[in-house]
Image (tube, helix red, strand yellow):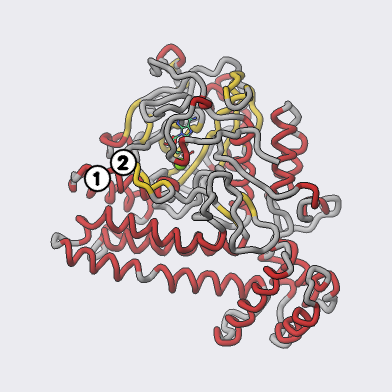
Amino acid sequence: MPLGCSLRRCRRCGCGPDERHGERHGAPRNLDAVSVAPAPTVTLDNRFARELSELALPWQAEAAPDPRLLALNETLAKELGLDAASLRTDDGLRLLVGNLVPEGATPVAQAYAGHQFGGFNPRLGDGRALLLGEIVDVHDRLRDLHLKGSGRTPFARGGDGRAVVGPMLREYVVSEAMHALGVPTTRSLAVVATGRPVARETLLPGAVLARVASSHLRVGSFQLVAATGDVDLLRRLADHAIGRHHPGLAQAEHPYLALFEAVVAAQAALVAQWMLVGFVHGVMNTDNMTISGETIDYGPCAFMEAFDPASVFSSIDTGGRYAYGNQPVVAEWNLARLAEAMLPLLDEDEERAVEIAVESLGAFRPLYSAAWSAGMRAKLGLPDGLDEGVAAPLVDELLTLLRASHVDHTSFYRALGGAARGDAEPARGLFVDLPAFDAWVERWRALGPDADAMDRVNPLYIPRNHLVEEALAAATDGETGPLERLLDAVTAPYDERPGLERYAAPAPVDFGAYQTFCGT
Ligand code: AMP
Ligand code: MG
């Protein structure tokens, strides 16, 4: 059951221009669409545009003929100091699609490069997105307010600059679910239907996603600057990244090395969390890997159901490069690309810079392993201090059993909580090799697992693929009820609630093998 956005070859993946992206536009700049009006409730900084003007192309959103709000994240709006009621007004919707630019804001398309499926593309950038500016939230943190689907920019290459309701709501629901699961991620503030049909394989309703992030700096941002050979700009980019994410590092003995090490640590922790919740990003290109350590770009992502390291959902990932089990290795590979880009900042002597980078990147594996092992011990309700010599083989053997019996990654751990309380039958029923499972449970129980602690870290409700598809199909037809119910379940993933049983169950067999398409 594919998504409605099925581009066979798409820009996300770095393929050449595709006729299916729709008509090309000769003169994209659409100044008529914008009315500059004072919006006293929203104050946007333009720090990125100011500090890194070489990477910021001032641009404006195309006009949305008939904006209609499909989803608004009131909790996030409050956190940003925005008034939800005013966002629902006509002017609020115009703000959320980029047609009303607050006084003083400088919307820009950001330039970046990236390795896409291993091949370097020196010029990517926001082809259909804009950074509206930065907003100081109620916790005094600077957050990017960004639009996706806001029209063509000079980085659009063959793309139409637009986005479709289904995939934008998909990003909304999956990113908010990830946040509720405690996984660092960009957030979704709103999805607004534009009122314009967008040409994909069929005509589909267009939408703009308003996304919030601690920044949109990517590994690809550094790669772009490194490729220009402009070391001064590279230094300013690194200074900007330090200022945004690790201001304390400015005082470090070697701030740029400290920045690199901080990104390595953040990504090791992030990917471990993906692995623990069974998340498959699907398109871990270096332009989709943040410096902040937040998950970004929910395109062909999916949650694995039956545990299998080879799980791949993306229609174009035929080689399994971004399979579930490959994600840690790919993250490390991407960080090696970041290290290469940062070499001129690590040492003047290139050979020495390479030595430093290799040594620092060496931290990735132990950091990842420690985060994964601690997470698995928590999922199994085992004490923190448990000897790795006991915990590691227990985990490895469990994974072998889960894989052999195609056990659902999410519901298993909740069922296992029941086993910790004395009723092993529901968990047992998931396995084919019962003697092997029984033997494993006996060893595990002997360690005294804490069932309540397990329930606090093992989610009941994740955005299961069949439920996401069902909700998006309904929303595309104008019925947002299923989406709201799904959001309600996945944004409180650990609290068991009667009536939500279907949100805790794997897809019915007739749903078949799930395939995702690049989110367009
Ligand atoms: P993504 O992974 O969605 O960020 O996409 C990868 C690259 O393709 C980025 O440079 C995007 O801005 C660009 N892109 C994706 N879809 C479109 C589109 N419909 N129109 C223009 N650019 C696009
Ligand atoms: Mg991207």
Which numbered dot is residue 309?
none
State the image coordinates of residue 58 (x, y, percent, origin top left).
Answer: 34, 26
Above or below — where is 373 with respect to 75?
below
Residue 20 vertical placement versus 341 (above, below):
above
Residue 387 percent location from the top left of the image = 56, 86
Q: Which mark is residue 227?
A: 1
- Give the Cα separation between the discs numbered 2 and 1: 7 Å
Residue 132 seen in the figure: no
Q: Residue at x 54, y 21 (%)?
A: 94
Image position of 209 with respect to 26: above or below? below
Of 435 and 259, the residue lying toward us: 435
Estimate how packed mark 1 is, as few (under 14), some (14 to 19) or many (20 or more) residues with alpha carbons within 10 Å. some
Please name the amino acid that badge 1 sits on.
Ala
Residue depicted at x 62% and y 80%: 383
Which residue is identified by label 2?
122
Asked if marks 2 and 1 touch (Cβ < 8 Å), the reply is yes
Task: Classify the position of the C terminus by image quarter.
Answer: top right
Helix, strand or loop under label 1: helix
> Residue 431 vs residue 140: left or right?
right
**Residue furthest toward the front?**
319
Disc 2 element:
loop
| Label whose residue precedes the other's in the sequence (2 or 1) | 2
Residue 280 visible in the current orientation: yes
Q: Which image quarter holds the N terminus? A: top right
Residue 429 screen position, x and y as percent: 83, 70
In this rendering, would 254 be left or right of 166? Answer: left
Q: Residue furthest left?
A: 349
Direction from residue 384 to residue 258 in the image, left or right: left
Total labels drawn: 2
Residues packed near mark 2 inside 10 Å, few (<14), some (14 to 19) or many (20 plus): some
Task: Give the residue drawn at x 73%, y 26%.
Answer: 478
Percent x, y of residue 187: 54, 44
